[in-house]
Amino acid sequence: MAFYMFDVDGVLTDENARPDQDVVKMIEQLAKDGHILSFVTGRSRGWLSDYLFPLFDDEIDWSSLYCVTEHGAIKGRGTDISSWDLEEKYVISDEVKDKLYKVSQKEKYEGLIQWDQTKESMGTVEAVHGDPGDKEHLKKTREALQEYANDVESISSESGNKIAISTYGVDVIHPDLTKKIGATWILDEIQSVEEVFVFGDSEGDLVMAVTAREHNLTNITFNWVGEGETPEEDHIHSVASEASYSAGTKEILKKHIG
């Protein structure tokens, strides 16, 4: 029995943030094979419920699925998001969210980024996705996200929060909020496992593998499906896919499924 921790954006989705049905089918097979599964993401629980969970096979018992959203602010098991818990201490103030929202509405960002109304604990903008394969629009949205992050740096720092830039968005979040919180909660819950597989596309995802190491687990593999150099850590085996996004995840998972 193995334990899998998946980031969602850029791991289970394509470059336009669309969940990949083929990857979902592979995850379903892992569930049928009796492995322990978890998602640790910056996305909201509403997003998972609207876009990812509808692709799941209802015949499978998902009650043991561990889910962590908004970088660790919300935790729960199963696909009934109403049963998950939000830790109020990680919720930034409405005053800060209002300031961030106003910046996101600047004319220069029109058609490139938009405010994410589904987030409960943080202030988030995400890319406005273009047509599949439109590399020019993708480039512009990435530039807009970075510019927005620069624009709200003072709002974030003066309010005692921090900025997290992901594949498709920019979050302003509580300073103590990282995926380590969610990974710790899951690892405290599960029984001993033979292998740990973490899938990520940003350096921040490596913390999930490091947390497993800190729980005295061995045989840990960090599966990198991002762009650029593969992050590495002592006593953690790193594997990089040739493709990025969900295509890279499929490439690696094919070797896990008999």
Image: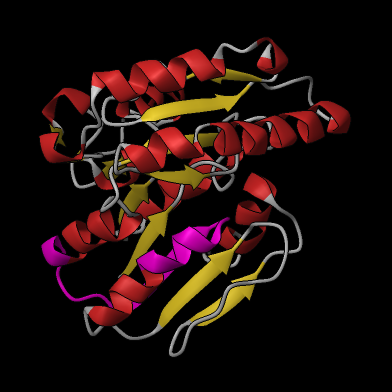
Q: Is residue 212 above or below residue 151?
A: below
Residue 99, horizontal then vertical, whole percent:
40, 19
Residue at position x 54%, y 18% from top?
Answer: 104
Task: From the top left corner, tell me how far across and down residue 37 is, in percent.
Answer: 32, 54
Segment tinted magenta in the rendering: 188-208
Quadrant where the N terminus sits is bottom left
The front one of 205 and 82 is 205
Q: Quadrant of residue 184?
A: bottom left
Residue nearest the viewer, comparing 103 with 49: 103
Please state the horizontal and vertical placement of residue 222, each as a whole percent of the image. 50, 71
Q: Quadrant of residue 47 in the image? A: top left
At which x and y percent is residue 20? 59, 35
Q: Nearer the viewer, residue 181 or 246?
A: 181
In this rendered view, identify the residue nearer to me: 97 or 207. 97
Residue 170, compared with residue 249, is above or below; it is above
Q: Residue furthest bottom?
A: 235
Left or right: 40 in relation to 243: left
- Taking the magenta stretch, the answer to whether it contains residue 57 is no
Quarter residue 93 falls in: top left
Q: Residue at x 64, y 71 (%)?
A: 230
- Within the magenta stretch, is there residue 190? yes
Question: Residue shown at 36%/47% (left/top)?
Answer: 39
Q: Is residue 111 visible?
A: no
